Image: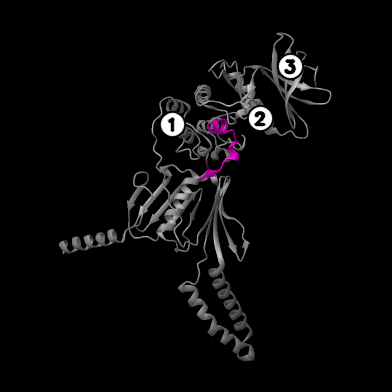
């Protein structure tokens, strides 16, 4: 395309980047003689309508923005080239190298420079998030940050570019979910299509961690979805704490706004790092698998309950009667009934011994399934993940998660239960009434952490034997006094 004229105005000078169905080029505006950047989207085999939606959203967003550290919108073209049709977004050219280019060239950044960079980017985010509705970039990373005019101890002018993944808070309401961003810099909630201003803070924090460690976030170990960068750096404790705060996987624990993040950076303060940790109880047969994309709880089989033992005991006389029946002492109908009864009881006992119930929650849905002798059944009681509205834990005394965060209600005696409400369904994790208080406590904490449920969505009730006895004695005393 070098030398080609677009829109009878923009002469192509060089290609800056290329992806399937897309190109970014440097061109000269023949009217102003200034260099411009043109992003191209082609209607080829790789084209998807969602791409055009994001492309047009980027153009509309840039039109609405006016900030010295953000490229300025110049033009939008419909392209009708001999070999290609598509669209072109023209924006101002910023002559500078990306943070990624600097890092690959071996440039290192001092702690003071990292703070300067963080402040500059936070000021840009304060501007973006301050719009009504808030504008969330969704793809902050080293390649989308440009630096120019570095001099002395100054990091230079900082620019935030590439608004191709941008979303405003109004656009996310309704419609289809589109997961965009770059792996390693995306916060956990973004994998589920959910983004808020604090999502940009996570991406900025991950970018700065790359800066101070020289390693991509995916190359660093993780624990409980937290990036373990601390052993790889020699930074002031306050900056380490701030970076941890920025990259908290849970929205409830992360800095909530760019303004708050800037204040915390400029005036370090000690934050409450209290984390409720409930370990898996010893000897528990419950199996839990989790990662940023799903959590799966596998409940053990019922086992030999009194009911199944009783049913199994019934099989012996039935088999004996049936055996005598096939000698001619019983009729055909009795034989068929006995066969059905024996088979039903046998299946019941086998299922009690070997069937496992599985609750699975992923980025899209929540549902039950079962596993029987290594074979998984179909999903049932399936609802949207976004429909999850409440987690309820009812326990019979014992250690509680937190007296400060959750609401406790003394009530009448009930069986231990852990339930999740989603849409029209309620998911009971103590289906067989076989889980201990400790197991319920553990599973509730794991679900609260993974789902990032706010306190108002969590209800914990305590049914106490002692309280129940005192309540009944009190009622008896009142009754005797009336008599």
| Residue position marked by numbered label 2 in the rendering | 53
Q: Residue at x 74, y 10 (%)?
A: 30
The residue shown at (60%, 36%) is 216
| Magenta segment includes 223 | yes
What's the CA distance linking mark 3 and mark 1? Answer: 45 Å
Q: Dividing the picture into quarters, in which one does residue 167 lie?
A: top right
Disc number for residue 315? none
Up-down: is 35 above or below 128?
above
Choose the circle earlier in sequence order: 3 or 1. 3
Provide the secondary structure element on which disc 3 rests.
strand
Q: Give the quadrant of the N terminus.
A: top right
| Residue for point 28% across, 58% down | 467
* Helix, strand or loop at mark 2: helix
Report the residue marked by disc 1: 238
Please state which of residues 242 and 28 is positioned toward the viewer in this rendering.
242
Q: Residues within 10 Å of mark 3 (few under 14, many from 20)?
A: many
Earlier sequence position, callout 3 versus callout 2:
3
Front: mark 3 or 2: 3
User: Given the current orientation, which residue lies at the most extreme right position?
Assistant: 82
Task: Let me know if residue 440 is in the magenta part.
Answer: no
Find disc 3 in the rendering and name its residue. Answer: 27
Instruction: Give x and y (percent) for residue 51.
Output: 68, 31
Residues at marks 1 and 2 touching, judged by CB atoms closer than 8 Å: no
């Amino acid at each position: 395309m070098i030398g080609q004229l677009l829109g009878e105005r923009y002469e192509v000078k060089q290609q800056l980047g290329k992806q399937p169905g897309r190109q970014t080029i440097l061109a000269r505006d023949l009217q102003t003689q200034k260099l411009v950047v043109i992003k191209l989207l082609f209607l080829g085999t790789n084209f998807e309508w969602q791409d055009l939606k994001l492309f047009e959203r980027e153009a509309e967003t840039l039109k609405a923005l006016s900030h010295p550290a953000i490229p300025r919108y110049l033009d939008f073209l419909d392209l009708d080239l001999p070999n290609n049709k598509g669209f072109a977004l023209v924006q101002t050219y910023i002559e500078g190298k990306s943070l990624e280019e600097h890092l690959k060239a071996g440039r290192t950044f001092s702690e003071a420079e990292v703070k300067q960079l963080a402040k500059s980017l936070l000021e840009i985010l304060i501007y973006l998030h301050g719009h009504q509705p808030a504008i969330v970039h969704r793809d902050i990373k080293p390649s989308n940050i440009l630096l120019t005019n570095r001099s002395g101890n100054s990091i230079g002018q900082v620019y935030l570019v590439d608004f191709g993944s941008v979303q405003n808070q109004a656009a996310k309401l309704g419609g289809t979910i589109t997961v965009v961003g770059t792996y390693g810099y995306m916060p956990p909630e973004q994998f589920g299509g959910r983004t808020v201003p604090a999502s940009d803070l996570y991406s900025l924090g991950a970018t700065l961690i790359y800066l101070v460690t020289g390693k991509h976030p995916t190359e660093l170990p993780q624990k409980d979805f937290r990036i373990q960068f601390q052993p790889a750096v020699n930074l002031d404790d306050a900056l380490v704490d701030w970076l941890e705060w920025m990259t908290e996987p849970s929205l409830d624990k992360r800095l909530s706004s760019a303004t708050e993040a800037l204040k915390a950076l400029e005036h370090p303060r000690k934050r409450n790092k209290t984390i409720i940790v409930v370990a898996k109880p010893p000897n528990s047969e419950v199996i839990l698998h989790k990662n940023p994309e799903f959590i799966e709880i596998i409940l053990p089989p019922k086992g030999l309950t009194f009911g199944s033992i009783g049913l199994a005991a019934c099989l012996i006389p039935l088999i004996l009667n049936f055996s005598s029946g096939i000698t001619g002492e019983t009729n055909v109908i009795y034989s068929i009934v006995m066969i059905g009864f024996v088979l039903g009881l046998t299946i019941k006992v086998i299922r009690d011994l070997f069937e496992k119930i599985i609750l699975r929650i992923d980025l899209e849905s929540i549902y039950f399934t079962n596993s029987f002798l290594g074979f998984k059944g179909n999903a049932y009681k399936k609802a949207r993940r976004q429909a999850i509205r409440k987690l309820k834990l009812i326990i019979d005394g014992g250690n509680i998660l937190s007296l400060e965060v959750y609401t406790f209600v003394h009530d009448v005696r009930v069986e231990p239960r852990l339930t999740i409400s989603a849409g029209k369904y309620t998911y009971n994790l103590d289906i067989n009434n076989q889980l201990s208080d400790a197991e319920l406590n553990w599973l509730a904490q794991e679900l609260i952490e993974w789902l990032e449920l706010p306190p108002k969505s969590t209800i914990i009730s305590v049914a106490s034997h002692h309280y129940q006895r005192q309540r009944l004695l009190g009622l008896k005393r009142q009754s005797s006094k009336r008599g």
